Image: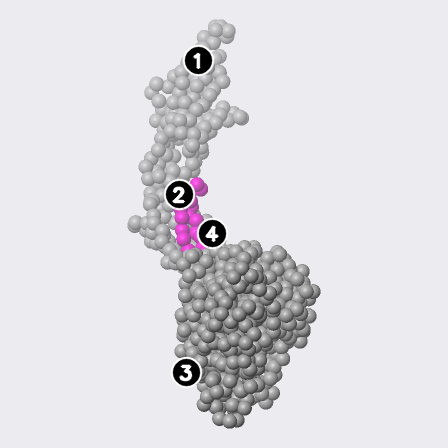
Amino acid sequence: MICANIFLLFLHAVHRMARLSVIPALALTIVFASCEDKNNKTDFLTVETTGINFSSGEGIELISYSSNAEIKVVSSQPEWCEVIVGEVGKYIKISVLENVAFSQRTANITVSAGKAEEVKITVNQDGTGPYFRMDEKDTNLTFGLLSDNRYITVDTNVDFTVSSSATWCTIDVNKDISQNNLNVSVTTNDRMTLRTAVIVISASGFEQLVVHVSQDGSIDSKPGMTVKGRVSCNNTGVADVVVSDGYELTVTDADGIYYLPSQKKNGYVFISIPGNYESPAINNIPQFFKRLIADANTEEQANFELTQADNERHAVLAIADWHLANRTNDIAQFNTCLADINSTINSYQAAGVKTYILTLGDMTWDAYWYSNNFLLPQYLGVLKNLNTTVFNTMGNHDNDPYCEGDWNAEQTYRNIIGPTYYSFNLGKAHYVVLDNIVYNNIGGRQGVMGNMSYSATITTDQIEWLKKDLATVADKSAPLIVAMHIQLYNVPNDGNSATFRLTNGQQLVNCLSGFSNVHILTGHTHDNQAMTPTAYPWLMEHNNAAISATWWWTGNTGYSGNHICKDGSVGGYTVWELNGKNAEWYYKGVGYNRNYQFRTYDLNTIHITAEKYAPSANATYKAMAPTYATPYQTENNRNEVLINVFKYDKDWTVEVMEGTQSLPVTRVSTKDPLHIISYEFQRLNRNAEPTSGFVSGNSNHIFRVTASSPNTTLNIKVTDRFGNEYVENMTRPKQFTLNMK
């Protein structure tokens, strides 16, 4: 019976091979088992075929077998040719993957069953011809504003090259996924418009594959938001940057994006430059603001680009009251000052210290804008000659005298210079610039000068903005430096008490409370004054002398040939040195080194008369001389010496030794005698009455000491609050001259 079954299997196999069009093996083994003894059987194995051919595509074939033992199958190329034994019926399942190669490939399948002889099945698969294609969905890519990447697949079995028409769009082969998967990357689009690129994928003998890439240049809109934008550095968004229009205020998100519900009243939006960053500058003015051109209901986008700058340690030159007006030889005199300023800047920059200028108002002179053709654009022409960035503060004389009312009069400044109030950061210090002038200018209109009247007031809008701005400052112990033109306090007396000059000074002080290291920098007076109110020990006002000294009069051609302010200070500027939270400062007189901090007078040699200092005055003006000369109109032979310490504050000390004897030093409030003969008597000598606002005023940084005789030498040592010592060995008698030091 067994023999008969085997014979039947043999006939079935021959029939199957004929159907598959395969050549049967000549050595097909048929094992005939003994028909006489079931317990002494011999293992046998019969398979349907020993050779199969597949086309290049995927395929499956079932091969029948016969055996009296358990069979096992093994493929020599399991990665593309898989073989399994069927669970139902006696067959072997052979599966092949697509062959994307050009050439044919072969796998060998070994079939075994007990002790029967193994059977080898040869599997051949045809190769594929060359192809080069991609899915149509990958031929158009659209990206949003921010940097991003996307994968596309090139379906090919040939070598290819890739190129991009734009540097912001790059392509890399990602070998971790597949050699034909391409990673398309775009940088953040900092432009205001859509941009496009073309990717070309080429293979020899095939038509090029083209991918069109577009990237949006706008940020998604949000309801109620009329201004949006992004603050970035090197194409990376900068988070937590304060952005404002002078009314509303917000901060950028993690991607540097911001939204603002602006009414666009000021016509611009600005950022508070973060510490250790800088904005690009035009004509030395940092471009931390963007002008808005659409109406209040139309959405606009304003992007800001920053550069990294280590300004943890930095210097700021605070320069007050330029009064450039193309008169009194001011431009030529300023060029001398310019050389001095640039020399100071260069010395810091050479030491690796970031250096900036902060003006304190009155860069121009409204009374001469139109008559002398020196307006804000002419000021910008001067500004570009400075060797560093300039942050500007508006003064009363920087308003347009042809416009009545504060808002209209300051519009020219906004149009040409920029924001009238704003903030920025250098290192750990937070700087705030305010416009504390309400310019009324009654009667001003096109072609007609108004009366140039004003009040020292910070508008309510600014106060509200200031509160919001200061609320963003996390470290209340870091330096807070507030710049504005008109002084907060009137000139203090020698007891260091004073009243507010600012009409809403208390309101400003209330805004600053909570900070422990506040410095207010002001100008306007052309004098040096320092004020630390007893009630507010955390606040110090620094009223700065003028770079123009006495409105450029004393250095005018034919005048005194010096550069002196109303309080006797040399015309100059204050240099601030900041390192982290530490702040120090000193006064720098133009034409002098930083160690020149005081001037001494021997009153025995000072007797101011018209005969000596205004010999060309007529009788009318000579009669005025005693009034202007007070208190030096009479001789003084009391061996008294005056010491004018330009930048004195309550933490300075003044010591005088006469030999081994320490002399008592008294702080007095009096006029500087050198300024009297440098300005008032120069005017009298020309039969012109001195301008009341330019004449000498009492200064409270003058000290008096009395020597024992007219001929003794005094050793004078002045020590500032930082421990720096300034000395003079004063040989007496000391002559009183226009060029004295």
Under circle 2, the secondary element is loop
Distance from label 2 to label 4 (Cα)?
17 Å
Amino acid type at image mark 2: Gln
Amino acid type at image mark 4: Asn
Residue at numbered disc 2: 179
Q: Nearer the viewer, mark 2 or mark 4?
A: 4
Q: Earlier in the sequence, mark 1 or mark 4?
A: 1
Under circle 3, the secondary element is loop
Under circle 4, the secondary element is strand
Amino acid type at image mark 3: Thr
Q: Which residues are magenta?
A: 169-191
Q: Nearer the viewer, mark 1 or mark 4?
A: 4
Q: Earlier in the sequence, mark 1 or mark 3?
A: 1
Amino acid type at image mark 1: Lys
Q: Nearer the viewer, residue 334 or 456?
A: 334
- Count the marks: 4
Residue 557 numbered tag: 3
Q: Residue at x 36, y 30 (%)?
A: 106
Distance from label 1 to label 4 (Cα)?
60 Å
